[in-house]
Image (spheres, rainbow, N blue to C red):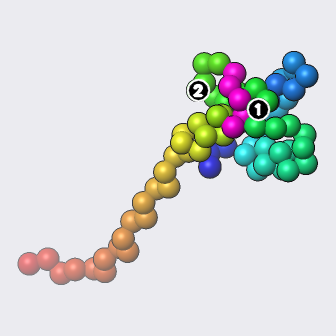
């Protein structure tokens, strides 16, 4: 995933920004739930964290396709 920073609204104060891995850790610890309001770059409003995570996953850039191996030297006619 791209390193989009996710900010969470907890006790009416913004927390973050967090990486996706930090969000997963916080959810596992119970620091917040997917119902907390959150925001990520590109969004126009605060949304439930679960929706923001979906948005971030959809917004992640696709990996660059790898190039084929460079061909060896050729003798041109």
Q: Position of residue 74 (x, y in %)?
A: 22, 80
Q: Position of residue 66 (x, y in %)?
A: 43, 64
Asked whether 49 falls inside the magenta stretch, the response is yes
Rendered residue at 31%/80% (across/down): 72
Q: Is residue 3 left or right of residue 14?
A: left
Label 2 SS: loop
Rendered residue at 81%/38% (across/down): 33
Q: Which residue is mark 2?
A: 42
**Segment colored magenta:** 46-50
Q: Which residue is mark 1?
A: 35
Residue count near mark 1 (Cα–Cα under 10 Å), binned few <14, some 14–19, many ≥20? few
Q: Where is 21 relative to 72, above or below?
A: above
Q: Are marks 1 and 2 in contact (CB under 8 Å)?
A: no
Q: Which mark is residue 57?
A: none
Q: Where is 15 relative to 50, above or below?
A: above
Q: Position of residue 39 (x, y in %)?
A: 70, 27
Q: Quadrant of residue 18?
A: top right
Mark 1 or mark 2, which has the lower sequence index?
1
Please state the total of marks drawn on the protein image: 2
User: In front: 49, or 19?
Assistant: 49
Q: Quadrant of the C terminus?
A: bottom left
Q: Is residue 40 left or right of residue 21?
A: left
Q: Is residue 28 left or right of residue 49?
A: right
Q: Quadrant of residue 16?
A: top right
Label 1 SS: loop
Q: Position of residue 9 (x, y in %)?
A: 82, 25
Q: Is residue 29 visible?
A: yes
Q: Quadrant of residue 46?
A: top right
Q: CA distance from mark 1 to mark 2?
A: 20 Å
What is the residue that sits farthest to the left in this orientation? 77
Q: Is residue 6 visible?
A: no
């Amino acid at each position: 995933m791209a390193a989009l920073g996710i900010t969470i609204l907890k006790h009416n104060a913004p927390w973050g920004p967090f990486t996706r891995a930090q969000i997963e850790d916080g959810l596992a610890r119970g620091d917040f739930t997917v119902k907390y309001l959150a925001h990520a770059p590109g969004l126009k409003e605060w949304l439930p964290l679960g929706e923001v995570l979906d948005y971030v996953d959809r917004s992640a850039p696709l990996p660059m396709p790898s190039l084929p191996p460079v061909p060896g030297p050729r003798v041109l006619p």
